[in-house]
């Protein structure tokens, strides 16, 4: 039977960081810290495999588990020399979740477990601190009842506020001991009224129920929403970590805090964090009290009060040394939770800190320069999709800025939107196409879906390590927290500034996540400047990767953008986009509406000149890099006017009777045009169209080569091939035109190729035959997905979200490549194509070319390159590097 429980503490541990898949991130790091001599409260971890068993058994614990827990608990009791449930000197426990992938705040935690009517008295006598004990007891009842017994959190909050009001105090720690005792009695009554049962007294029953609740929280709505947003596999499960409690709320010699080993917003080196004296960890992230700064560096984040560095310099020195030790050990920036109990320092957790993309780049470069990590290691620290943040606009420094409030800059960005006060409103309005900003007193894990939908987040409470700050940074969302200059009343739907200005729901404001400023109205933005660190980081990625990265680009401007982002060529130039130009569309329509080849000829000659100039611009912009040009693909009817009025207008412009136009348009209509007269079928039925395009491409290539005295690499791609004979028919005519054009330009250095787009299942199956004549394949995964699934990409949005929600499909197959079918066709087509043509160049030009998960598959399939939109080129470059390193 597999080992279900791993113990740690006292300088030893059963596991280590290599068992992250079993122990979760938190459990693996607790074991690792214990092994390297970091002061960690001892405990044990129940593995993620038990979580899987829990759900397989209909949300029930395996029958043998509590026996294993009892053995692990006995070992823990020996280490700490206290026993769970001992009325004289009780051991209290924390029960926390810990998935293999960090999911901050998404699952449940229970602290102070083991208190009851007897142990609370014994602990009070042993500690000599009644306030600490009764405060811990009321926290246990509130947290346990919310998480385990599912009693509404608001009922306890209401009772807490009434006690404070009756005693005339504002803060929880100002309540008298008698007030806390009354509060505990009131809390127990709330539980009895809500559940019909007394709050559980038996500490072992508390422990069993808490373990079940943490496993249940893996499937709660907010965890499900977070996994969906971050593409985390539900099969991973969560571990449960059970530790001896250490108390930051044991008086004025105790504290709790959270820190980062480097600034998570900017990447600047140095500890940055917050702490609270006489508090438990939940108080720091909840934003209920304003924390103090860890050190003088953190003071710039506008935390209040004396720094830990000044309050306890000896403990700050010990903490600083441990931070350096952990960063060097893990070879990455760390996010650390700590507790000081009666002047003794304990570390509760360390993990790789979530950071913004600009910070990630700076941290990566600094870690390499400081010889803490090597290039390949730091390349793995950044999610490729997070590079999007570097491309986000910033506010135009010349734009008028009416600052109405100032908060803490928790996550960068420059965004505007309509104010909404609930997560549900944010999600609903975002689905309707509105840009919204979620404004709250503080966010909670239940708000994650609204945070994802919003452009940015603004809170009136909380610090740089609050829930809003951590989650927003992880999402790459602009976030301003701790904005004390605003009052938020969600029920009334208003936000009021300290200057008396009131904003209502759907009023527009802007957020500057780099300065923490809240601005009235919509502020103009400009494109960001990318620093030298980004260039160095991406150079390292290019050194590591094997896949080349191209861009889908249809204009010289798109080509320039793509090259600036590091594209190594154009993987898809769609010629039909040129046809829609307002100055050309009527000529194109005349060509389409012509009755025969002879009538089409004069119109095609005009289009040839236009297309040639387009290709000259694109080939010039790419400076000798390969350019893959797809011949005309869409059905001809897409270019034609729709409706009587448009036909009348076209009739007047081209002097052709409207009746004749209407008749011709009607003759070109198709019931299912996406599977009708398009792609190579056009080139076979109307060969003069493809011949014109081939002339334009080759003439442009020769002109650019001669003018710039450089080799030019046009790749001419035939779309929608399903049979080798189709490709061969078109290829022969293109080749004849290409060779005759080259003879007319003996000084041109043009290295052209002719290949095809593999976007139909049959093409993948007969790829070996097609490759005998084709020089390259480019998988058009958009259409390949449509034709493999029998889905319309344009219409499937109506039901695909439900398929993903219900678990019928793991992901939207148009966003991330389908592994079960489409991937197999890509692999099969590549393998069969290269069997008959060892020199076959293979790429992909569908939207999947910019998706990190899909790039993994393309790397493993041995493709030569991926192609994506210009702004996703850096994402593809980093993804390809990470695949090569793995």
Image (cartoon, grey):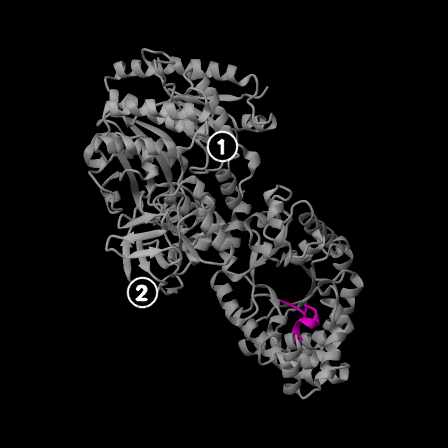
Pick the residue in front: 3 or 186: 186
Query: Which residue sits furthest bottom?
Result: 655
In this rendering, would 189 be left or right of 604? left
Residues drawn in magenta: 628-642
Q: Would you place residue 369 above or below residue 580 in this image? A: above
- Which percent across, then down, holds residue 114? 38, 18
Res 542 seen here: no
| Camera-nearest label, 2 or 1 | 1
Marking on residue 217 = 1
- Which percent across, then down, holds residue 776? 68, 60
Identify the residue shown where x is 45% and y is 51%.
426
Residue picked out by circle 2: 397
Q: Would you place residue 855 above or below residue 678 in this image? A: above
Identify the residue shown where x is 58% and y is 55%.
849
Would you identify the image quadrant in which residue 596 lies?
Answer: bottom right
- Which percent across, then down, holds residue 295? 24, 40
Pick the residue in front: 690 or 153: 153
- Which percent across, then down, holds residue 191? 41, 25
In this rendering, would 84 be left or right of 406? right
Marking on residue 872 = none
Determine crowd level at label 1: few under 14, some 14-19, many 20+ residues with C-alpha closer than 10 A. Answer: many
Identify the residue shown where x is 63% and y is 59%.
794
Name the element at disc 1.
helix
Mark closest to the chain's N terminus, 2 or 1 = 1
């Amino acid at each position: 039977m597999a080992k279900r429980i791993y113990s740690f503490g006292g300088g030893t541990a059963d596991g280590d960081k290599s068992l992250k898949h079993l122990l979760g991130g938190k459990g693996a790091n607790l074991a690792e810290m214990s092994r390297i001599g970091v002061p960690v409260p001892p405990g044990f971890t129940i593995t993620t495999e038990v979580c899987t068993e829990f759900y397989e058994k209909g949300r029930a614990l395996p029958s043998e588990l509590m026996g294993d827990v009892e053995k692990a608990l006995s070992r823990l009791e020996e280490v700490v020399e206290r026993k769970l449930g001992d009325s004289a000197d009780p051991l209290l426990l924390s029960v926390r979740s810990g998935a293999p992938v960090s999911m901050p705040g998404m699952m449940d935690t229970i602290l102070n477990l083991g208190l009851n009517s007897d142990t609370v008295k014994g602990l009070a006598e042993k500690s000599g601190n009644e306030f600490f004990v009764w405060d811990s007891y009321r926290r246990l009842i509130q947290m346990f009842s919310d998480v385990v017994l599912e009693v509404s959190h608001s009922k306890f909050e209401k009772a807490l506020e009434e006690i404070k009001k009756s005693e005339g105090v504002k803060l929880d720690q100002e309540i008298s001991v008698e007030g806390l005792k009354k509060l505990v009695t009131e809390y127990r009554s709330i539980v009895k009224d809500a559940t019909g049962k007394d709050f559980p007294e038996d500490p072992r029953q508390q422990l069993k129920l808490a373990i079940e609740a943490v496993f249940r929280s893996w499937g709660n709505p907010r965890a499900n929403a977070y996994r969906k947003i971050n593409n985390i596999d539900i099969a991973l499960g969560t571990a449960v970590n059970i530790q001896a409690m250490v108390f930051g709320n044991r008086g004025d010699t105790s504290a709790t805090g959270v820190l980062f080993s480097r600034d998570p917003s900017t990447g600047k080196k140095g500890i940055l964090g917050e702490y609270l004296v006489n508090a438990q960890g939940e108080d720091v992230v909840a934003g209920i009290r304003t924390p103090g700064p860890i050190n003088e560096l953190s003071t710039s984040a506008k935390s209040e009060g004396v720094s830990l560095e000044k309050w306890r310099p000896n403990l700050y020195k010990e903490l600083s040394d441990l931070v350096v030790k952990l960063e060097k050990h893990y070879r990455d920036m760390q996010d650390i939770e700590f507790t000081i109990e009666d002047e003794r320092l304990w570390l509760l957790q360390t993990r790789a800190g979530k950071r913004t993309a600009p910070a990630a780049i700076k941290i990566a470069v600094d870690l390499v320069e400081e010889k803490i990590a090597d290039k390949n290691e730091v390349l793995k620290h950044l999610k490729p999709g997070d590079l999007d943040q570097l491309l986000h606009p910033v506010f135009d420094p010349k734009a008028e800025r009416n600052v109405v409030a100032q908060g803490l800059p928790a996550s960068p960005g420059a965004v505007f939107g309509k104010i909404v006060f609930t997560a549900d409103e944010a999600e609903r309005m975002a689905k309707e196409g509105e840009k919204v900003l979620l404004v709250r007193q503080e966010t909670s894990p239940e708000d994650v879906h609204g945070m994802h939908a919003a452009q940015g987040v603004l809170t009136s409470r909380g610090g740089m390590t609050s829930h809003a700050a951590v989650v927003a940074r992880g999402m790459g969302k602009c976030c301003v927290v701790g904005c004390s200059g605003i009052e938020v009343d969600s029920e009334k739907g208003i936000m009021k500034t300290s200057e008396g200005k009131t904003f209502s729901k759907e009023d527009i404001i802007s957020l500057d996540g780099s300065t923490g400023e809240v601005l009235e109205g919509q502020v103009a933005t400009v494109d960001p400047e990318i620093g030298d660190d980004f260039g160095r980081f991406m150079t390292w990625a290019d050194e590591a990767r094997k896949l080349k990265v191209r861009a889908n680009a249809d204009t010289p401007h798109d080509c320039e953008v793509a090259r600036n982002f590091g594209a190594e060529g154009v993987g898809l130039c769609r010629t039909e986009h040129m046809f829609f130009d307002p100055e050309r569309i009527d000529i194109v329509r005349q060509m389409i509406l012509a009755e025969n080849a002879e009538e089409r000829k004069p119109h095609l000659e005009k289009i040839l000149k236009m297309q040639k100039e387009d290709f000259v611009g694109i080939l010039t912009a790419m400076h000798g890099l390969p350019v893959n040009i797809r011949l005309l693909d869409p059905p001809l009817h897409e270019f034609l006017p729709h409706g009587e009025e448009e036909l009348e207008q076209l009739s007047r412009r081209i002097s052709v009777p409207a009746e004749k136009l209407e008749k011709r348009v009607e003759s070109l209509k198709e019931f299912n045009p996406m599977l009708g007269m398009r792609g190579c079928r056009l080139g076979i039925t109307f060969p003069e169209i493809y011949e014109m395009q081939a002339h334009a491409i080759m003439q442009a290539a020769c002109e650019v080569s001669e003018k710039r005295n450089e080799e030019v690499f046009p790749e001419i791609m035939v779309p929608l091939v399903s049979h080798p004979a189709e490709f061969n028919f078109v290829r022969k005519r293109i080749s004849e035109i290409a060779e005759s054009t080259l003879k007319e330009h003996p000084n041109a250095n043009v290295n052209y190729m002719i290949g095809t787009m593999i976007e139909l299942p049959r093409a993948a199956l007969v790829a070996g035959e097609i490759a005998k004549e084709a020089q390259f394949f480019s998988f058009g995964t958009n259409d390949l997905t449509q034709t493999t699934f029998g889905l319309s990409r344009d219409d499937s949005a109506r039901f695909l979200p439900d398929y993903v929600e219900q678990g019928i499909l793991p992901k939207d197959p148009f966003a991330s490549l389908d592994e079960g079918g489409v991937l197999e066709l890509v692999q099969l087509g590549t393998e069969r194509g290269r069997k008959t043509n060892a020199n076959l160049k293979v790429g992909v030009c569908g939207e999947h070319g910019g998706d990190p998960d899909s790039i993994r598959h393309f790397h493993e399939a041995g493709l030569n390159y991926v192609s994506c939109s210009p702004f996703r080129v850096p994402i593809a470059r980093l993804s390809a590097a990470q695949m090569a390193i793995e």
